[in-house]
Amino acid sequence: MAKAVSVPPVKIEVQPERTHFHFMLAKNPNYFGNIPGSQLEPNFKLITDTSYEQLTCVGYNPDTQLMEATFAIKRSVGYSGKLCSTGSFEHVRFYLDFHDGAGFIDQGSVAINVHDIPAGNDCTGQSQFPIIYSASLAKKTRKFSSCSKPSLPTLRAILSWNNDPPANSPNWKPVWGNVMECEVQLKPQRIFNPGDFSIDFSSFLDLAVSSPSLNLKQAAAISGLDLAALNPQPLPPKFNDVVKQAAELKVPASRFAYKTVYNMIKYPVSDITMSDKLQFTEAKIDFTKIIDELAIPLPVDKTKANVDYEELECVGLDYNTETLVATLRIKKKSGFSTNLCGIGSREYIAFWVNWNTPCGWEYINTVQLNVHDIEMTTDHLCYSVTLPLDATFHRQLCSTPNLVQVRGVLSWNVPPSTTDPDKLEFYGNRVDAHVQIKPGRVLDPNNPKALYTIIGGVDVDHVNDVTGLTKPGSIFAYNALPVPTGAPFDGKIVINGPSFVGHKYRFKVTNLTTLASYYLSNALETEGWSNTPPNSPLFTQTPDASNYYDFLPPNKNVLNVLARFTPGTNDRLLVEMDVLGIPGVFAKVIQMDNVEPVIKVSVDDGGDCTKYKKGDTITGHFYVNDLYISQWSFSSNWGGSQSGNANTAALPGTPFSIATTAAGSPCGAVYLSAHDKTIINSQSVGHHVSAHYNICLKP
């Protein structure tokens, strides 16, 4: 018998420009030559390298106002560590140019945590690479659009590995990553004018003033105001008008009459079909030819039907929010029933997931997108849709990366199949991708337990059980932005965790200084999901007499929010959760801090802000103190800037002296600002305070 020969594993090398990226930037910010106009000579020219990661799609949803960028991770190594490590981050910064002369306006950035993940095949034998991720961010700049004059801004996304693209720098190019842009469409806004309606608003306005705690829907319901009447929806166009418009725009009957003929084929002997046939005959349109055209078999490429008008280009998963994302391109100016002032037509995207165990497609849901005839300035518009994916009971430990296959199926004006993942309608296509499910505790839906995974916006594993402060490497769970080490909490504390529908839970909060405790009993508002606008309906529940809340299904609680409360203290808290009828309690400690940094600036002028003359040296002190100080900065109009990340000397503080010149500015000020590490309202970092003192120099 031949002796078995062991074959050593193939080692994949990652170049030093990748492994020592930050070291090289520390030596020279323009080390790779990607900073335009820099005085620093590059050491090594490397710009927009896409061999590791690459943007593949950008899109925007007019209804949710979410900007989306989808990118591919192409390699199994080069991302600074395996899944159980910190790994590295893919940063995406978004810009919008509204074509109003202001240029590209920074909308902010978001980060996605990525890791080295071993290459392999899925249950069907297909390679699991590339892995497709999406990054989502809400549009910040408020702009209005009308249906008669659509606003079509250009959306630009910059993908940069391990280096957040600088703010307000739309022309900056990354070393690792790339830039993509596409024209998108803003949702037209109706300008409300009470004079347009013969409706009595007096009862509604009186109630709104006297009961400010009521939301709009509650006040309208109590006062009898019909909100639907304030926003009348356009009616479907008449068939003759559709035929006339189609002739003017040169849209074929197989497009504008597609839905009608589709239903005729589906219900061949119905009364509606008989009526539709009569309409076709009166309009002198041969519907039998349209039927023959729609009956043509699909081409050899089973992933595409007719994509002349629209095409699905990317599907991915937002790793932060675990939301499925699909991006599609509208390719023509007409063929979508009406302009923006009309009812338009629908693009349907059905999502499927192959969890690998068992191997096969599971239908998740179908999302709708309203589209219209729009006079585009380019040859396409980019849209995106999202669908929350509940992966609670599909998680695996970080030692076993969980890659699954997702599919998006696009269909125009008729819903795609919910039973056959391979079926395409006449218009549309499908796209598959492999995505990564976030690791976590392995849970059984039939074995509920007390557990929450996020507190104050941070993963519970990154909060120290003794101090209640954040550990090194902490990030916000839903956008992966960094959180300082040793950060306390303030404001609204949001708790997220798995939902065991059919069971109840409650929270007990104990102040570890006073030992006083209480159960949360406030009304809990959650955001749900609907596949038709509004896509994010709100739900409110109150606990029962024993302070137990109901676990909610995913469509009523997309972020798995279990509690929201505002402690309003500087003490350390023990937050305990129990599930009704289930043994065991889950608990974490958090340190609260609702005190802003104390700062003070004093100038040695005896209270006379005009004491100094040009050429004198201004002297004084500045003082900063906070238990959790992050950083402070001191400056003036005459120079003398300082900064630090520790408290200054005790009052009167750290001395300063600022030399002035005869040619210097006659008037100015000294400035002091500080911020601490505190996590505010579970979504941002730092109490920010500032102070200044005005000074005028005599000639």
Image: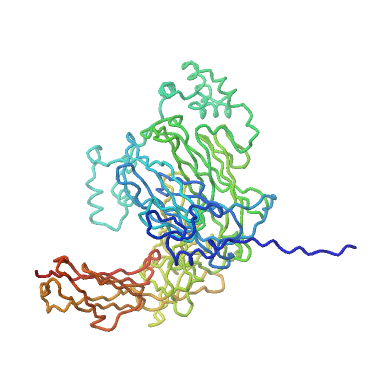
Q: Position of residue 524 (x, y in %)?
A: 41, 62
Above or below: residue 555 compared with residue 564 = above
Q: Residue furthest bottom?
A: 650
Vertical relation: 360 (above or below) 453: above
Residue at image position (62%, 61%) is 13
Quadrant (top left/top right/bottom left/bottom right) for the N terminus: bottom right
Residue at 50% in and 16% down: 281
Give the residue drawn at x 47%, y 69%. Answer: 474
Name the one closer to the observer, 616 or 577. 616
Most foreground residue, 37 or 523: 37
Give above or below for 263 relative to 558. above
- Answer whether residue 53 is visible to the viewer in this image: yes
Furthest residue toward right: 1
Q: Where does residue 43 sit, x and y in percent of width and height?
A: 47, 60
Q: Is residue 202 left or right of residue 177?
A: left
**Residue 525 location, x and y as percent?**
40, 59
